[in-house]
Amino acid sequence: MIEPIPLQTTLETVRFWAIVVMLGLGVFFTLVSTVGVIRLPDIYARAHTASQTDTLGAGFALAGVALAFGWQHAAVYTVLLLFFVFITNPTAAHAIARSAAETGVEPVLAEEGPETDETDIPAETDGETR
């Protein structure tokens, strides 16, 4: 006869995999933020990606750490730190973008299309004009 798995063991397994998933998502979003800061063209786009994905990366990582600690004082401090990150990170990104705007930094805008010279436009064909 097969013995049933105790509920405690099942919950510990679920908890372990929840911690792994949260830490994995935290690493993923932090990596996306790093790539965005390196690849994006100007301060506005960099502040945007750093604010959003870094907040998610730190949020998932700290949530995983709080879940790993369980019901301890350290878990309460981790949740308070998570709240602090959620408040300060977007505020700091906004302050950086506003400072850049006030000092006259122009955003890099996408071009509307390839520029054409007069030499690229064909001349009249078959008596029709453009």
Image (cartoon, grey):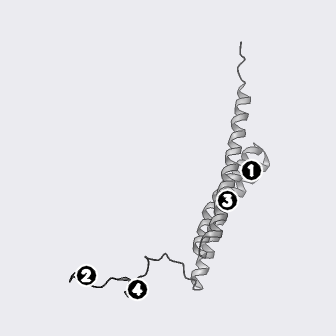
Q: Which residue is mark 1?
A: 76
Mark sitting earlier along the chain (3/4): 3
Residues tagged 1 and 2 counted as in contact (Cβ below 8 A): no
For marks 3 and 2, give the one nearer the viewer.
2
Q: CA distance from mark 4 to mark 2?
A: 18 Å
Where residue 114 appears, x then y in whole percent? 44, 78
Label 3, label 1: how far apart the Cα atoms are: 27 Å
The structure residue drawn at horizontal position 68% and vertical position 53%, both measured from the top left corner, is 26
Q: Nearer the viewer, mark 4 or mark 2?
A: 2
Mark 1 element type: helix
Q: Are there few (<14), some (14-19), or many (20+) residues within 10 Å of tag 4?
A: few
Q: Which mark is residue 125?
A: 2
Q: For the view shown, which residue lies furthest in the top direction?
A: 1
Q: Amino acid at mark 2?
A: Thr
Question: Where does residue 3 sit, x and y in percent of width and height?
Answer: 72, 17
- The residue that mark 4 highlights is 117
Horizontally, residue 70 falls left or right of residue 99, namely right
Q: Secondary structure at mark 4?
A: loop
